[in-house]
Image (cartoon, rainbow, N blue to C red):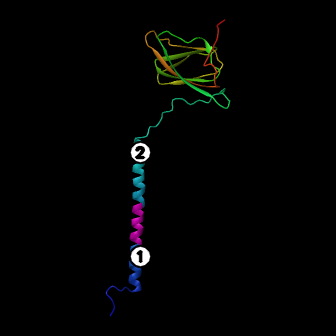
């Protein structure tokens, strides 16, 4: 007597095809679910990741070429009407304005006014002075400098 569970080859083929079809659907759904899960995780992580905002990008010449460099970050506060001495820098220097408006006057060039939240690169070997032309508002800047080690931050220039 033949078992009620015995399958002929035709039934066996149909069942096998159905199982493969179900497996393929399951694998497809599993893959889609995995992609969705990874996407949701990445999106969730992105919310907690700080994305820096580019403030300034400039190609400059005259950077130090030695084996090592000295990086300096300085903060300067100007009261209304104050200014720097007339000077030069041996290498480009970047200034970022925290508060107020920084006005850079460079020999042979038009003055440049940089407002809070903005930055500029001051060129090397150009005679200059920085001003707070406001009569009432203070000025605060952060200055970033890269130079050969032990190089003075600025070189005073005597006006003639």
Q: Main secondary structure of the magenta part?
A: helix
Q: Which residues are magenta?
A: 20-30
Which one is earlier in the sequence, the residue at label 2 or at label 1?
A: 1
Residue designated by label 1: 17
Residue 123, how many percent across, how many down? 62, 22
Residue 104 image-quadrant placement: top right
Residue designated by label 2: 45
Split into 4 quadrants, where in the image is the N terminus? bottom left
At 45% from the left and 9% from the top, the residue drawn is 135
Eye-nearest disc, 2 or 1? 2
In this view, the residue in front, 117 or 88, is 88
Residue 65 image-quadrant placement: top right
At 42% from the left and 51% from the top, the residue drawn is 39
**Vertical side of 82 occupied by 140: above or below:** below
Q: Helix or strand or loop: what does disc 2 sit on? A: helix
**Vertical side of 34 occupied by 152: above or below:** above
In this view, the residue in front, 65 or 104, is 65
In this view, the residue in front, 21 or 61, is 61
């Amino acid at each position: 007597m033949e078992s009620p569970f015995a399958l002929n080859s035709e039934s066996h083929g149909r069942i096998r095809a159905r199982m493969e079809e179900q497996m393929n659907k399951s694998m497809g759904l599993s893959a889609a679910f995995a992609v969705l899960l990874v996407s949701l995780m990445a999106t969730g992580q992105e919310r907690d990741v700080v994305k820096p905002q580019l403030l300034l990008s400039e190609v400059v010449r005259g950077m130090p070429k030695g084996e090592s460099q000295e990086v300096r970050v300085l903060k300067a506060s100007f009261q209304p009407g104050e200014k720097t001495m007339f000077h030069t820098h041996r290498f480009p220097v970047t200034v970022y304005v925290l508060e107020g408006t920084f006005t850079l006057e460079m020999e042979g060039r038009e003055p440049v006014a940089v407002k809070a939240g903005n930055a500029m690169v001051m060129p090397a070997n150009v005679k200059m002075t920085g001003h707070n032309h406001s009569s009432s508002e203070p000025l605060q800047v952060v200055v970033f400098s890269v130079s050969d080690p032990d190089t003075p931050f600025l070189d005073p220039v005597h006006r003639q």
